[in-house]
Image (tube, grey):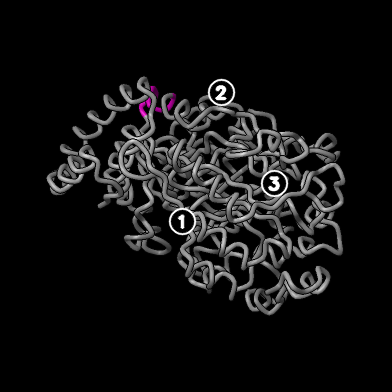
């Protein structure tokens, strides 16, 4: 077990260059810095006809090139911008309909060997109270998330350290899946554990595939190599740009074909980072036929002892942030876009209309903050400070009022709808049909098991509208759906089509 060796030896054994060098083209990665810099520097105003042609390509659920994406970042005409935003919403509804997926982050530790200049958890920060959750504490956290709040999926967050190595990851995931909590009807449990984790070796990813992970997230933080090396100091694991960049290539080789990309916006020019994300998505599509299942775009936020945040000249204004999300929805039309509780409730509500499909709720970032340690929410135990503190019930109620059905569905993994399979369904709009049916079933579950009375009443009205739509739009499967829905109302749980 790697926790039995010294920290120095553990660090020296982490990176396996042979696991990424084989993907390089004459020693170069797929991020072409000179090319991206050139198209970012172009400040010419695009021809409206060209813009409309690009938007039509997005509506056909075709990925955009870096050049096409850059064109959309340069649009200044208010009418054309309004058309872009309207098209982004059309693309989202074509692929995902009116569903929003919810989840919660679960931070298991704040121990890390890295020294990222923007992170409150960095190893040199002496102001942080270090903590790692035991199996008992993980169960306690999960009981609250699954049994009181009603979450069905988590994103579990690990620091990079021998104390939270692959053994700890495997054990913690198994612990989360094992927790079952009595609720109003049946039992509450986590049905899907997604990972936000450090770059892993292929053999480690194979183990996580076996234990049953969902999406594997590794955020590049910044695609600009010079900035990357500046904010991830030399001598640390995270300083190796290529080891991190090719995390998803290794994941696919290991059989993990559902992955999430992300950038920490504010470290460098947002337009360059956006094009880096597009390049990454296109690389994965071309190599494996599978693009990112999700993309995240957290903004740089104040963190304990992280002075770089205060001094960054690249922090995004809200207007730029909304443009970023609009263009990203158009550039990678099939992907799920995650808007996190870093942002305010008001801004999150706005950008859901621009293409976001996933949001966290009842979020707590302190280690142990959900169950047993109110003090865990102190600045000394959090990676950053959240902006939207709404409960899951409150967020669900807000979404219902705007016509969104909240999906707690996790059926895709049990139905084999992952990787290339789900990519085909997403690009043809067929995935939305499956997901709408299962969204209604799981939403019915959540309303009956966890919702406040006000939320339940509002949700019931929306569900009846959705059932009418299903009957009209999917008559061939309606009778089977209705059978499952009736069983769900009677207290049967975890039915899916």
- Could one spot residue 85 in this view of the protein? no
Residue at 73% from the left image edge and 45% from the top image edge:
41
* Residue for point 74% across, 41% down: 381
Label 2 crowd (10 A; few <14 / some 14-19 / many >=20): few
Direction from residue 381 to residue 61 in the image, left or right? left
- Which numbered dot is residue 110? none
User: Which secondary structure lies at badge 3?
Assistant: helix
Q: Taking 481 as reference, is 225 above or below it?
A: below
Q: Name which of mark 3 and mark 1 comes first in the sequence.
A: 3
Q: Quickly name the residue at label 2.
A: 346
Q: Position of residue 330 (x, y in %)?
A: 49, 43
Closer to the eye: label 3 or 1: 1
Instruction: State yes or no: discs 3 and 2 in contact (Cβ < 8 Å).
Output: no
Measured from the top left, where is residue 217 in percent x and y?
58, 56
Query: Do we see residue 346 in this rendering?
Result: yes
Asked whether the beta carbons under mark 3 and mark 1 sit within 8 Å of each other, the answer is: no
Magenta range: 398-403
Residue at which label 3 appears: 40
Give residue 292's position: percent from left, percent from top.
Answer: 51, 56
Task: Say whether disc 2 or disc 1 marks the residue closer to the N-terminus.
Answer: 1
Front in this rendered view, residue 214 or 427: 214
Disc 3 or disc 2, which is closer to the eye?
Answer: 2
Spatial distance from mark 2 to mark 1, Cα to Cα?
34 Å
Which residue is label 1 attached to?
A: 177
Type of secondary structure dominating the magenta stretch: helix
Q: Is residue 424 above or below residue 70?
A: below
Callout 3 crowding tier (Cα within 10 Å): few <14, some 14–19, many ≥20 = many
Q: Earlier in the sequence, mark 3 or mark 2?
A: 3
């Amino acid at each position: 077990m790697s926790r039995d060796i010294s920290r120095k030896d553990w660090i020296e054994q982490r990176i396996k260059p042979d696991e990424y060098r084989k993907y390089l083209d004459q020693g170069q990665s797929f991020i072409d810095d000179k090319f991206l810099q050139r198209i970012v520097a172009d400040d010419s105003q695009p021809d409206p006809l060209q813009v409309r042609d690009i938007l039509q390509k997005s509506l056909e659920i075709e990925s955009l090139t870096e050049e096409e994406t850059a064109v959309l970042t340069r649009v200044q005409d208010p009418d054309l911008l309004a058309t872009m935003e309207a098209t982004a919403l059309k693309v989202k509804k074509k692929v995902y309909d009116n569903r929003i997926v919810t989840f919660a982050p679960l931070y298991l530790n704040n121990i890390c060997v890295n020294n990222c200049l923007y992170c409150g958890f960095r190893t040199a920060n002496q102001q942080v109270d270090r903590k790692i959750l035991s199996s008992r504490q993980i169960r306690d956290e999960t009981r609250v998330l699954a049994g009181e709040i009603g979450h069905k999926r988590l994103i579990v967050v690990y620091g990079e350290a021998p104390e939270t190595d692959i053994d700890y990851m495997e054990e913690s995931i198994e612990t989360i899946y094992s927790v079952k909590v009595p609720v109003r009807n049946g039992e509450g449990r986590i049905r899907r554990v997604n990972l936000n984790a450090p770059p892993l070796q292929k053999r480690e990813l194979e183990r996580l595939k076996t234990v049953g992970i969902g999406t594997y997230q590794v955020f590049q933080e910044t695609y600009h190599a010079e900035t990357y090396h500046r904010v991830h100091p030399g001598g640390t694991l995270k300083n190796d740009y290529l080891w991190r960049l090719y995390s998803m290539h290794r994941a696919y080789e290991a059989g993990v074909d559902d992955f999430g990309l992300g950038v920490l916006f504010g470290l460098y020019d947002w337009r360059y980072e956006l094009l880096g994300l597009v390049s990454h998505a296109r690389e994965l599509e071309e190599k494996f036929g599978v693009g990112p299942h999700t993309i995240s775009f957290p903004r740089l936020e104040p963190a304990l002892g992280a002075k770089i945040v205060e001094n960054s000249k690249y922090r995004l204004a809200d207007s730029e942030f909304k443009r970023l999300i609009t263009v990203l929805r158009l550039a990678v039309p099939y992907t799920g876009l995650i808007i996190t509780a870093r942002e305010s409730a008001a801004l999150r509500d706005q950008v859901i209309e621009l293409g976001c499909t996933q949001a966290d709720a009842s979020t707590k970032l302190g280690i142990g903050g959900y169950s047993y340690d109110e003090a865990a929410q102190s600045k000394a135990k959090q990676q950053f400070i959240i902006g939207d503190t709404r409960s899951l019930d409150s967020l669900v109620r807000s979404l219902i009022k705007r016509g969104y059905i909240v999906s707690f569905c996790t059926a895709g993994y049990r139905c084999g709808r992952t990787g290339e399979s789900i990519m085909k369904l997403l690009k043809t709009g067929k995935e939305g049909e499956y997901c709408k049916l299962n969204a209604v079933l799981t939403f019915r579950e959540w309303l009956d098991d966890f919702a406040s009375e006000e939320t339940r009443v509002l949700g019931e009205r929306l569900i009846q509208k959705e059932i009418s739509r299903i009957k009209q739009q999917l008559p061939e499967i309606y009778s089977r759906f209705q059978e499952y829905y009736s069983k769900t109302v009677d207290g049967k749980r975890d039915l899916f089509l």
